[in-house]
Amino acid sequence: MEKHNKELLSLLKEGISPSIGCTEPIAVAHAVAKAREKSAGKDLISLQVQVDPNLYKNGLMVTIPGTKDKGLSAAAALGFLFGKSEKGFRVIDELTEKEAEKARSLLAQKKITVTLNKDYQGLHIEVILITDSDKLRVIVDQTHLNVISVERVNKDEDFLPSSSPDMNKDKAGLNHKIREYGLEDFLQFSNNIPLAELAFLDEGVRINLRIAQEGLTKEQDVAAALTRLVKEGLISDDMITYAQILCAAASEARMAGSRLPVMSTANSGNHGITAFLTNYAVAEKQKLPQEKLLRSLALTNLITFFIKSYTGTLSAMCGCGVAAGIGAGAGVVYLFGGTKDQMMGVLYNMVGSISGMICDGAKEGCAYKLAMASGWAVQSALLSLKDSVIHNTDGIVDPGFKQLFKNLGYLCDPGMVNADKAILDVMLRKKEN
């Protein structure tokens, strides 16, 4: 048991980290920064970036933190000029408008190209940097910051083709290890790990609550509208609405280019917002002790990691709903002292209801999806606590914890691969128009 607890704690700490901005453009900035740091050249000749369809989709319309600029090209320029790869997901934090203007000037020189490679499957970035003195290639694969190779050739030489994109079919990283565990293990860990070991989760609450408070200063967004509806008596001032308001506000601020960090989970800031603030909202409204909240967050995040190991880092489905939202639902049952069966009940309710929520890229409108995911996570948990549960053999639902998410993963890939292509096609047509 002690060995398992150490391993799960390690996985928990590895999968949770602060990040600034949407993680897809940040991944591009990080890869470009790594290439520049390895280069001996002074003058940029060209910078070519190729990315997979999901990363391209998620980076198309999102604002870069601290700027008014959107998209992967802006991220590449900022990463080249100012990125520090050792800072991970905070590779381009603390940007000023002066620095943003320098990036715009660089983009105007037409030396940077970002293209979509539809043959890549799974998260994949390839950067080729050519300077006055060298030529480098950096490849990132499977997870956002996972640099698998840095190569250098003579300027007049070409790189050999990179490994087959099929390698990405095997969703690697820490999530493989988590598949060795199940709900019983996650519960045992959450119940028994010394509370001091979970203190870092409180930082996640504080960081995500802070950006939510920034989002609440905006007057025209969904969080503000929900707040007005509460004041007008049209919706209730309860833990469901509170979770929706906090999650939507934090997401809106993040997607609009806030300089504030969020605590991400499973390589996603919006997943982290959903996981941390849904649990926090319930604990706050119910006046539950800090220990209960931290232990529920451990459970929520471990379940989220487990689900992502089957659905993939990026997919056609909105992970805030079908991963973090599901994990948060289990966390809410935990907060209310529910049984293992009641936790399974909320998993059935969530998978059996919102598993078709699509991901059509990162943008400010994601706030609506976080509002839906967090609110329904709380409601699904409350329904399960009252023994209202979707039948565990309905549709893709399965009685077994592991098989339930194997089914969900199969629905993502191969099930929704063509849907993912269609979503991207629609987005690209809109961009062209």
Image (cartoon, rainbow, N blue to C red):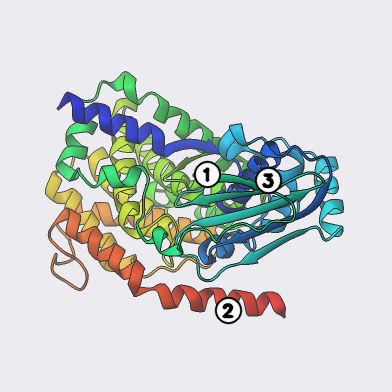
Q: Alpha-carbon neighbours of circle 2 within 10 Å: few (<14), some, or many (≥20)?
A: few
The residue under the point 18% across, 59% down is 403
Label 3 SS: loop
Residue corresponding to mark 2: 426
Dot placed on the residue nearer the N-terminal end, 3 or 1 = 3
Q: Quadrant of the C terminus?
A: bottom right
| Residue 70 is at least partly visible in this image | no
Q: Alpha-carbon neighbours of circle 1 within 10 Å: few (<14), some, or many (≥20)?
A: some
Compare residues 75 and 408 and report the one nearer the observer.
75
Residue corresponding to mark 1: 147
Q: Position of residue 366 (x, y in %)?
A: 53, 59
Q: CA distance from mark 1 to mark 2?
A: 31 Å
Q: Is residue 430 above or below residue 35?
A: below
**In front: label 1 or label 2:** 1
The residue under the point 28% across, 57% down is 380
Q: Quadrant of the N terminus?
A: top left
The residue under the point 38% across, 57% down is 312
Which amino acid type is shown beneath numbered disc 1? Val
In the shown orientation, is residue 91 left or right of residue 276? right
Which amino acid type is shown beneath numbered disc 3? Pro
Q: Is residue 179 above or below residue 199?
A: below
Dot placed on the residue nearer the N-terminal end, 2 or 3 = 3
Q: Quadrant of residue 85?
A: top right
| Residue 305 is at least partly visible in this image | yes
Label 1 SS: strand
In the shown orientation, is residue 154 left or right of residue 54? right
Dot placed on the residue nearer the N-terminal end, 1 or 2 = 1
Which amino acid type is shown beneath numbered disc 2? Val
